[in-house]
């Protein structure tokens, strides 16, 4: 019985300390709220470690709550998808093993943009994240009405998971 208790304590102690970015082979999944001017919704991202400080991934968002004088936008106006590339610099800054800061670029169906994010892991599998994104180049510079929904400053907050 003592051996079982010792093994359980050692196993559970190793799960208490989370690590934000492990490098090559690391996989992150995030889900959270998306907030921008005249709209809010849900967003998901995934990141796959390529090297010690480099990752690529994908993101998608769907705007649930929109306020616009033209009425309700269509699905295509609410949805956005992007491929992303991150420089995970948490270990370079040597702040904490639990914290990762990642500036990056994204190429989406509506624009080419940049983002800056941070994630903090409480355990090996669960943490929180925040991310801010801006468009650098819009595919339709004359976008009006619903076309502006996914071409503006956006903030995300939510949960992050190690897979």
Image (cartoon, grey):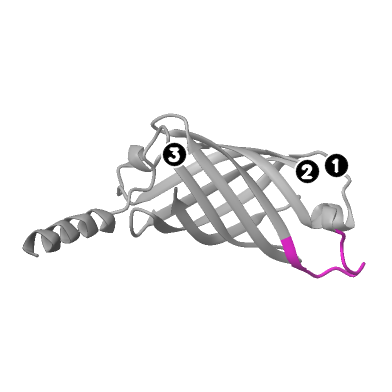
Q: Closer to us: mark 2 or mark 1?
A: 2
- Which residue sits at x=19%, y=60%? 8
Q: Residues within 10 Å of mark 3 (few under 14, many from 20)?
A: many
Image marks 2 and 1: residues in contact by CB distance under 8 Å: yes
Which tag, 3 or 1, sits closer to the chain's start?
Answer: 3
The answer to whether 21 appears left or right of 40 in the picture is left
Asked whether 101 or 48 is in front, the reply is 48
Magenta segment, which residues?
63-74
Q: Report which residue position mark 1 lands on.
A: 140
Q: Secondary structure at mark 1?
A: loop
The answer to whether 130 appears left or right of 22 in the picture is right
Q: Residue 158 location, x and y as percent?
A: 52, 62
The answer to whether 117 appears left or right of 153 in the picture is left
Image marks 3 and 1: residues in contact by CB distance under 8 Å: no
View extreme (left): residue: 2
Instruction: State the image quarter where residue 154 is shown.
Output: bottom right
Q: Find out whether residue 5 is within the magenta segment.
A: no
Asked whether 116 or 22 is in front, the reply is 22
Q: Report which residue position mark 2 lands on.
A: 110
Which tag, 2 or 1, sits closer to the chain's start?
Answer: 2
Residue 88, numbered label? 3
Q: Residue 122 location, x and y as percent?
A: 34, 60
- Which residue sits at x=23%, y=59%? 12
Image marks 2 and 3: residues in contact by CB distance under 8 Å: no
Q: Secondary structure at mark 3?
A: loop
């Amino acid at each position: 019985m003592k051996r079982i208790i010792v093994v359980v304590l050692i196993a559970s102690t190793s799960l208490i300390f989370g690590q934000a970015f492990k490098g090559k082979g690391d996989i992150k999944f995030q889900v959270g709220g998306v907030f921008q001017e005249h709209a809010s919704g849900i967003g998901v991202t995934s990141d796959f470690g390529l090297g010690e400080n480099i990752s690529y991934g994908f993101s998608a968002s769907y705007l649930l709550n929109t306020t616009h004088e033209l009425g309700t936008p269509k699905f295509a106006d609410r949805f956005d998808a992007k491929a992303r590339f991150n420089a995970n610099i948490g270990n370079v800054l040597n702040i904490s093993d639990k914290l990762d800061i990642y500036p990056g670029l994204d190429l989406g169906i509506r624009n080419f943009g940049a983002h800056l994010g941070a994630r903090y892991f409480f355990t090996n599998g669960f943490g929180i994240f925040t991310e801010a994104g801006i468009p650098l180049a819009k595919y339709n510079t004359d976008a009006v009405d619903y076309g502006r929904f996914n071409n503006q400053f956006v903030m995300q907050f939510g949960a992050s998971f190690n897979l």
